[in-house]
Image (cartoon, grey):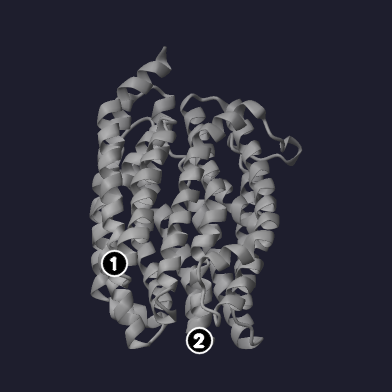
Amino acid sequence: MEGRMDMINGSLGDKIIKYAVPLAVTGVLQQLFNAADLAVVGQFSGKEAMAAVGSNAPVIGLLVNLFVGISLGSNVIIARSIGQRDDENISKAVHTSVIVALLGGLFLTVLGEFLAPEVVKMLDVPGEVYPMAIKYLRIYLVGMPVILLYNFESAIFRSCGNTQMPLVALVISGVLNVILNLFFVLGLGMDVDGVATATVISNLVSSAILLAALMKTEMAIRIELRRLRVHGDVLVQILKIGIPAGIQGMIFSFANIIIQSAVNSLGTTVMAASSAAYNLEIFAYYIMNSFGQACTTFVGQNYGAGKGERCLKTLKLSLLQSLVSTAAVCGLILLFSRPLLGIFNTDPEVVATGRIRLEYIFFAYLFSFAQEGLSGYLRGFGVSFIPAACAVVGICGVRLTWIFTVFRQSPSFPTIMQAYPLSLGVTAAAILIVTLFMKPSKRYVIASEK
C-alpha cells in the first residue's frame, strides 16, 4: 500500500504518466459506475427516471464542490510538506482533513435536506420528473459524509504519489454499486431510490477501505484515531488554497444549474439525451483532469524542495500528455457515439441529440486541457485565487450571459452548447496570460528559498 513516488528526483515524464493513469482510470470507473445508475433506470424504469437522476448532477456538484476544493488544498499542503520533509505538518494536515470531511459532509446532509425542494424547482424539472428527482436527491444527500471522506482520503494518497489505492477502493465499491443497482431495481422493483441507496452504500465501503489503509501505513500520512482533531494553523493553510478552488467549483456548478434549467426547458427527450452524452464526455474530461492533478502534486512537492526548473518541466510534460491522451479518447467516443448513447436509451431522437452535445463539448476540450493544466500548475505553488477568478469570469460569466441573452433569443439545444467552447476559450486565454506574466516557477520557488 505504501506506493510513495519520488517526485523531486530523477525522470518526470514516466512518473507523471504513472501517477495520472490510475487517477484517470479511477475517474473513468467512477463515471462508469455512475453511468450504471442511469443505464439501469433508463432501461428498466423509463426515460423519466433517467432524466430525474441526470438532472440532479449539477445540484450535487454545487453542494460537493466546495469541499472537493478544500481537499485539493489538503493535497497541496501535504505534497509541499513532503518536499520539505516536514512529517509533523503532514500528520497535522492529514488528521485535520479527516475531521473537515466528516463535519463538512454532515453539514451538507442537513443543509441539503432543507434546500432540496427549492433547488430542484430552480431547474424547471417537468412535473412528471419532479417527484423522482426529489426522492433521488434526498437519499443521495444522506451519504455526503462518506462521499467527502473518500475524496479527502484520496487527496491524502495522491499527495505522496499513490494513486493506486483509491483506484482499488473504487473498483471494489463500484462493482458492489452495480450489483446493488440491479438488486434494488430489478429484484425489489425500486426506481431512483434504488440507485441512490446503492450509491450511498458503495461510498461507505470505499471510504472505509481507504480509512483502514491509512490507519495501517507506516508513512507520515498514517491516521491515528486518538490524534484526530483540527489543527488551526494547518487548517488556515488548507483553506487558503482550498476555498478559492471550492468557490470556483460551486459557482461553476451554479452556472451548470442555469444551463441544466435551459436544457430542461426543451423537454424530457433533450434532458435524457444531455444526461447520456454527459456520461460519455466525462470520460475524456477525467483523462484531462488527471494530468492537471498530477501537475498540482508534482509542482507542490518540487516547490517544497525549491526546484523551480522541475516545476516548469512538469507543466510542459503534463500539458503534452494531456493533449495527446484526451484527443485519442474524444476521437474514440465520437467514432462509436451512436451505439454508446444507445446504451442509455434507444430512442433515435435521444441518440441524435446526444451526438450534438458530444460534438460541441469535444471541440471545447481543445481549450479545456490548457485551462486544467495551467490551473493545476498555479495551485501547486499555492496560487489558488487567480485561476479561480479566471474561471469564474471566463466560464461562469460567459455561460450565464449567453443563456440569459442569446439563448432567450434562439432557444435551441445547439445554442446552449455553443456556450461551452466560447467560455472555455476565454478562460484558457486568461489563465495563459496570467501564468506568463507571473512566472511562478521563478518567483515562488526563489521566495521559498529565502
Examine the image and state in which quarter residue 13 appears.
Answer: top left
Q: Is residue 71 above or below residue 133?
A: above
| Quarter of image, res 26 | bottom left
Query: Residue 132 appears at what percent x and percent y?
Result: 60, 77
Q: Is residue 71 left or right of residue 331?
A: right
Q: Give the amino acid type for the residue marked by disc 2 in the picture.
A: Gly
Q: In x, y percent, where is residue 188?
A: 66, 86
Compare residues 447 and 421 and report the one nearer the observer.
Answer: 421
Q: Is residue 2 visible?
A: no
CA distance separating discs 2 and 1: 27 Å
Mark 2 or mark 1, which has the lower sequence index? 2
Secondary structure under the numbered disc 2 in the rendered image: loop
Secondary structure beneath label 1? helix
Q: Which residue is found at the position 46% from the left and 28% from the top?
A: 83
Query: In the depicted view, which residue is nearer to us: 173 or 98?
Result: 98
Q: Which residue carries the number 1 mark?
A: 415
Q: Residue furthest top?
A: 450
Q: Amino acid at mark 1?
A: Thr
Q: Is residue 50 above or below residue 249?
A: below
Left or right: 40, with 390 as reference point: right
Residue at the right extreme, as displayed: 226
Residue at 41%, 59% (x, y): give it: 25
Of the 4 image quadrants, the one containing the C terminus is top left
The label shown at residue 363 is: none
Q: Which mark is residue 46?
A: 2
The image position of residue 351, as x and y in percent, is 33, 81
Q: Is residue 18 left or right of residue 313?
A: right
Work out whether 417 lies above or below 81: below
Task: Classify residue 186 by image quadrant.
Answer: bottom right
